[in-house]
Amino acid sequence: MAKLVFGMNLSLDGYVDFQEFAPDPALFRHWTDHVRGLTGSVYGRRMYEVMRYWDEDHPDWTQERRDFAEAWRRQPKWVVSRSLKSVGPNATLVADDVEAVVRGLKDRLAGEVSVSGPELAQSMTEFGLVDEYRLYFHPVVLGRGKPFFAGPRPPLRLVASDLIGRDVIRLTYVPA
């Protein structure tokens, strides 16, 4: 049975933002290794559109960026959207019965499946499907934006904490 994991970079005050802070080299390597180890990922539409950046090579990329892109392209992806009509390579569009599809993935796959996007993660939380939450706190206070928890925070129990790179703390929680 697969484990469904929700993890993202966020500010100290709980907001996710892809423009305000970027991973240092150690954290970028961590994310590359994480993606390499995934069985697959379930994306909400907006997060998937952000990640489509990795579908095509860019001439100015470093080897580290090429490594991440290769890992991302290789993994199977399920994209939850009612507005998209098609998705890119190695991706499956999920428009209906999201709960049943994700339950089916958890039942038939082994390893970790990442859920990406706060709103999708909130839905998966409400269905009781998220097995682990990984919060990667950066030393930044934004004061606005999209919160990591799109709805009420579920009851959680801390199971691990660690420093990644120079200044990112990862807190790992499971449902209480």
Image (spheres, grey):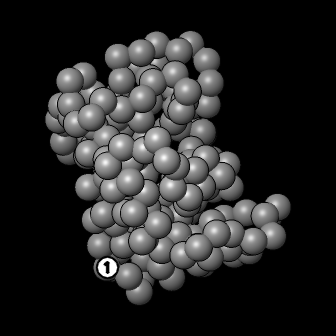
Q: Which residue is mark 1?
A: 110
Q: Residues within 10 Å of mark 1 (few under 14, many from 20)?
A: some
The residue under the point 66% across, 64% down is 80
Residue 89 in sight in this render: yes
As drawn, 17 above or below 156? above
Question: Where does the N terminus fall, quadrant-wise?
Answer: bottom left
In this view, the residue in front, 118 or 63, is 63
Q: Is residue 109 left or right of residue 14?
A: left
Quarter of the image holding residue 96?
bottom right
Question: Residue 107: x, y in percent?
Answer: 42, 83
As drawn, 35 above or below 151? below
The residue under the point 51% across, 55% down is 57
Question: Residue 95: x, y in percent?
Answer: 74, 71
Question: Residue 106: x, y in percent?
Answer: 42, 76
Q: Is residue 97 left or right of residue 51?
A: right
Mark 1 lies on a secondary structure that is loop
In this view, the residue in front, 147 or 129, is 147
Q: Amino acid at mark 1?
A: Ala
Residue 51 in sight in this render: no
**Circle count:** 1
In this view, the residue in front, 155 or 15, is 15
The residue under the point 82% across, 61% down is 83
The residue under the point 53% across, 70% down is 77
Question: Residue 139: x, y in percent?
Answer: 35, 16
